[in-house]
Image: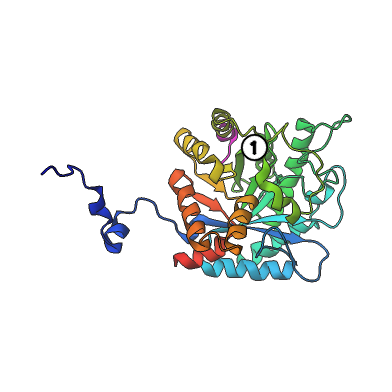
Amino acid sequence: MTFPVHRPRRLRQSPAVRRLMRETHLAPSQLVLPAFVREGIAEPVEISSMPGVRQHTLDSLRRAAVEAAEAGVGGIMLFGVPAVRDAVGSGADDPEGILNVAVSALASEVGDALVVQADLCLDEFTDHGHCGVLTPDGGVDNDATLERYAAMALAQARAGATLLGLSGMMDGQVAAVREALESEGFVDAIVMAYSAKYAGAFYGPFREAVDSQLKGDRRTYQMDPGNAREGVREAVIDVEEGADIVMVKPALPYLDVLADVRAAVDVPVWAYQVSGEYAMIEAASANGWIDRRGAIEESLLGIRRAGADAILTYWAVEAARWLR
Ligand code: PBG
């Protein structure tokens, strides 16, 4: 009788063996919770396309951050939803602006337990919804935007942010922010660059979450979904400019890019499991079409396996509790 020479099933025979053989692990500390804080509301507002996610008041945000810290989550990434917007996004670098106020509240309250992180981009603060300021003909003005990002970085650092998440996809943004931070002595501010951020359909629910004013798209600054080499190039440029961490976003449709970036740089590589990825699994589970917990755990594990050192995910707190 012939027999299989190789029997990989040996290493799958029982839960104990499988546990010992697992190559990739997830830990609560590797999860970062993205959170929305909205100015001028008395109660949190549910986001209909992201069941279970809400726009927070400052108070409910504080409670959510304490919960996240207790669950062992590694950090919280804050997005502000201002009451008033204008062409240059003035609320972004106003010390009284909602995002900066939230950063400073959390820095003093949970800063020892959680890495407090601020989204550094203008789209929530502009009345046209673009990630930068506009040229007279309606394009996004790269270099004028860099000056706004530098001002925003200083405001966030002064508010006490430990990590700045540069999500605007302007050329030179890491260098501009780094130079501004150094000039005021913020040498420890961590710069996390959304290096390979793709333009596409998966940010839909986020636009509801931040009440986005955008008409049109971001294809002149976010990347074409067909391009993997370009994602690596963006990451390499950002590391050269001084990024401490680079990110790939969205996550599941771009695992190849994540693996390529992981191989090309030696700084930490993060991934963002974005709003559309969240909404798909929530919607399928709500219909009874998919095992919710299984799908969430498998997606997070897959993102880790492809090379992510940490993951931004709206399930951070729940997943961290499962992992404990
Ligand atoms: C832009 C920004 C976006 C997201 C994070 N930062 C939206 C966009 O690029 O249009 C999306 C995150 C998500 O979909 O969960 N500052």
Q: Residue 52 placed where, x, y %? A: 65, 65
- Quadrant for the N terminus, please: top left
Vertical arrangement, residue 73 with respect to residue 172, above or below: below
Q: Which residues are magenta?
A: 237-244
Query: Who's the residue at 44% across and 35% down the image?
Result: 263
Vertical arrangement, residue 67 with respect to residue 19, above or below: below
Query: Who's the residue at 80% across and 61% down the image?
Result: 39
Viewer-closest of 53 and 15: 15
Viewer-closest of 81 and 2: 2
- Furthest-left residue in this view: 1
Decide if residue 93 is in sight here: no
For this view, does 131 lie left or right of residue 296? right
Query: Is 239 contained in the magenta span?
Result: yes
Amino acid type of disc 1?
Val
Vertical arrangement, residue 265 with respect to residue 211, above or below: above
Residue to which mark 1 is pinned: 174
Vertical arrangement, residue 240 with respect to residue 184, above or below: above
Query: Is 119 contained in the magenta span?
Result: no
Viewer-closest of 265 and 206: 206
Q: Residue 59 placed where, x, y %? A: 72, 70
